[in-house]
Image: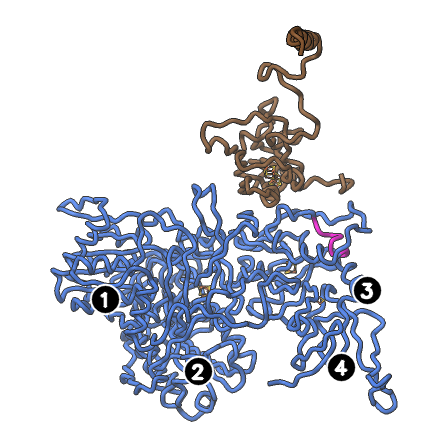
Chain colours: A brown, B blue
Amino acid sequence: MGVLEPLVELARGLGQTFRYMFERPVTVQYPEQKRTVRPRFRGRHVLKRYDNGLEKCIGCSLCAAACPSDAIFVEASENTDEKRFSPGERYASTYEINMLRCIYCGFCEDACPTEAIVMGDNYELSFTDRRQAIYPKDMLLEPVHVHTMLTPQKVDAGVFTRSVPEMKDPRD
Amino acid sequence: MSKQVTLTIDGKQITAPEGALIVDAAKMAGIDIPVFCHHPKLEPVGMCRMCLVEIGRPMRDRATGQIVMENGAPKIQFMPKLETSCTNRVEEGLVVLTQSEKANAGQKSTVEFLLTSHPLDCPVCDKGGECPLQNLTMAHGSSQSRFIYDEKLHLEKQVPLSELIYLDRERCIQCARCIRFQDEVAGDSVIGFDERGRSTQIVSFSEPGFDSVFSGNTTDICPVGALTTADFRFGARPWELDAQASVCSQCPVGCNTTLNTRREAKAGGNIVIKRVMPRQNEEVNEIWLCDKGRFAYHYTESKKRLTKPLTRTGKDRKVNRVSWEAATKLAGENFLKAKKNFVVLASGRLANEDLFNLKTLADQFGGKAVLYSHIGGGELTAQVGVSAGTNLGVLGSGSTIVVVASNLYEEAPIWYLRVKQAAERGATLIVMNPRETKLDKYASFVERYDYGQEIKSVQELTKKGKLGDAFMKAQNAIIIYGSEGLGVAGSASLATACAKALNETEHVGKANNGLIGVWERANDQGAWEMGFKPEDDLAAALKGKVVYIAGADPVGDDPKLAKALESADFVVVQDILENATTEIADVVLPAQTHVEREGTFTSGERRVQRFYPAVAVVGDARADYAITAQIAKHMNFIMQSANANIVFEILAETLKPFEGLTYEKLSNVRVQLPMIGRGDMYYGGTTYENTHGLGVHLSAGATRGETVRIPRAQKEALPKVKDTDLLAVPVSKLYHRGATIESAQLLNQRIGKTTVSMNFDTAEQWGVVEGAQVKVSFDGVSGEAKVKIDETVSAGVMLVPRGMGLAIREPAVAKVKL
Ligand code: SF4
Ligand code: SF4
Ligand code: SF4
Ligand code: SF4
Ligand code: FES
């Protein structure tokens, strides 16, 4: 082993460091910087609305039935044209997801007959209390742009009679 | 046993009783044939074509009529087309193929065809999850339809048939089960098909809509979500529900029920009852429930439930919330002071265990145990009542059933249904009533008597004549007596006459023979067995006494009793709901309802049945038997109260009729046919299978060989009526203002207004007309009521419904004023 050997090693190492100063960094400055997620990323759920603001969710509880970790709790009530939340007769008067139980598998999304529950791209979930992990309906519902889109809505009688939208191609 | 025939289904050799339908025979052999319109309790119609199978019959030589043999076995000739297995009966040598390619194709097409006009409603349909159409589509349906989606039938969604039952016409598959149930089983033909072809729809043609007390059952047997109840509408998905066995607390029939419960956000995160479903018990309610039993359960979650012990003390009657210890101590001290002045007034709302502890307490301290009821005669049903082996469901030709002074349809609906069916099976039905009742239609003999003449009519049964023959010569005879137009004393004498008739003709002490009382409450029979008795003059019995009231509201029911209790020394009330009596009581003790605890009821047929806790206890309420024991402790008397089971053990040791009974025996089950309520394709309805006990009959005094002691029948104590007088008589009504019914909002419309009925001439004589609001007064009671003209009421008589605000105890001379 020569006397100069350690110095050579040191220089080589520093050289490597020096070289990487000009490479593109692989890390980001989270939370100032955020990465966009992949198209099929499964983050925190969102309850979707139709264009007119009516909720897509009809309170059928199929998501809760599909959920392997029993994270969803749904309770249904009846719509009227005076106070309409969703098309058809039934809407979810209570809709809760326990985000601590959820394993983000996306089964709920698959089970939903109206594509109401959708896994979003929010992964920043933190709680200081277990209770906070239970997201009620108003936290899950998609925000609206104009207040007329808020539910419940007063609508014309006999327009929104079907709970499940008619699908031209059922495989859609 | 009927003749057995042997046939082959899917290669399996099976034997079945001659005359059985192929579907039923297959079911018994464990082969499921899919069905929609077939129901084991209804006549076959073959309307839906779901049960198509291939049927082959042994070929016969046309000339000789001999069976053609081939290779040593009969040659089987298959029909060129598929046949319905729900209309064809088993025959010797049949060969049935349920799974062949042809049969499967037929079943598949039927489902496909049914779905052409079925909406995509499963996610919002109350039947979804327990729906045969869903199940059969999964099992037999095709994954694609050849029909055009846009041609699906579109109709307005829910149409209420009544305030209780909703119809969704798009979902109906026209199997006619609901119509057939109403026609064949319930005998209320109030719904039917309208229009034809694809537009065929169910309509109700009664006013008010779907006017039958059995309407809820159609939602159980409807194989789709076309008929659903307003009560359970969107309540929960079936798979989210827990099930707990229970017994109906509304009338003496004691129908077996299943309480479906769920934790609910609307109820503050509590577990609540979402619906009451029948639980199969072929010896009690088969697979049916009446609408009262199904919908009236809401009282258990009423806002008026008592939750904390209260006392009223001092001159100003200050209300204090106190601890259990303090409240029961105060009660105990006063009971001790009372000495002979102690009265325990309890009703059949309480379980056997509660009544036993109450009776023990009364006995120990020299108190009087009084039953809060308007019917007498229970000491006779305990002696000559029906005993082990009794089953109205098997009575037929050779049996005689007498119904006297009771409108069973209103008082004990499921008994009505079972008596009616017994009559249809060939039993001789004798109906004795002063006015027409629904049962008359099915009776072999209808005997009309004037109010006050019931005993004379019953005596006819043991005299020569057509009634006497039908009764005396019968192999089995049951008398069901009620309190139409009678008070405590009157019904007691009627019971005496009935018991005498039964005893004289030796129709006692055997199965399917004896006396049945149509009591007011679920466990009145139990109270009688414990030794409780009603008082002829209750007001007098309460005056100046120290009264311990359990499960009764005398103050709210009757102003006379209210007055008597005003002058009572000390009043302790133990109940589930706030009422007028808890308003005046010195001590109020909150009790648990039967859905929160364990216990047993004794039905009118003297069957002891267990109920189980289904929901959490409301507030600090305690079980009645435990409350009594706690009071007793302060009186230095130790009584068992650790749990209902222990109390029942002691009860069974003490009381002869209960001898040998244990909770375990009460929860035994046997296989019951037809099989209903299993997770299979042979769909009998959403009735639950009975896994928690069929109950056990008490033995009757006569069965145990004791001498039957029947007091002499007294004369009818009818008030003296002049021709010009109006006689007010009490009658019972299914939906009345009782605390356990009124809390169910859905039933309010059926309860209706206080109405008195009389015939046209009587009304004219008193100058009133149909619908008039009149002032009614009798026997020191007065109140308002609406007049109803009813031609079935005899002249000079006014029917006053019990439990509708006019406190009628017994027949009385009355006045009406506009
Ligand atoms: S993502 Fe999976 S675990 Fe989470 S709520 Fe949906 S079904 Fe349940
Ligand atoms: S999110 Fe979808 S599956 Fe869940 S209750 Fe609503 S409609 Fe049904
Ligand atoms: S309402 Fe139900 S039970 Fe009645 S015919 Fe239609 S599908 Fe059958
Ligand atoms: S018949 Fe009587 S016991 Fe049966 S459900 Fe009706 S009220 Fe209850
Ligand atoms: S035709 Fe047989 S079940 Fe309907």
Q: Please, what is the three-letter code of the amino acid marked with disc 2?
A: Ala
Residue displayed at 43% across by 57% down = B751
Can you identify the residue that label 2 sits on? Answer: B511
- The image quarter containing residue B798 is bottom left
Q: Same chain for marks 2 and 4?
A: yes
Q: Please, what is the three-letter code of the amino acid marked with disc 4?
A: Gly
Q: Position of residue B464 (x, y in %)?
A: 42, 93
Residue displayed at 20% across by 60% down = B632
- Where disc 2 sits, the SS reads loop
Q: Which mark is residue B538?
A: 1
Q: Report the side of B135 relative to B54 (left or right).
A: left
Task: Please report the bounds of the magenta region as a residue range.
Answer: B112-119
Residue displayed at 67% across by 56% down = B135
Q: Is residue B117 magenta?
A: yes
Q: Report the side of B180 relative to B801 (left or right).
A: right
Q: Residues within 10 Å of mark 4 (few under 14, many from 20)?
A: some
Q: Which mark is residue B676?
A: none
Q: Earlier in the sequence, mark 3 or mark 4?
A: 4
Q: Report the side of A34 relative to B804 (left or right).
A: right
Q: Earlier in the sequence, mark 4 or mark 1?
A: 4
Can you identify the residue that label 3 sits on? Answer: B101
Q: Position of residue B294 (x, y in %)?
A: 48, 59
Q: Quadrant of the C terminus of chain B?
A: bottom left
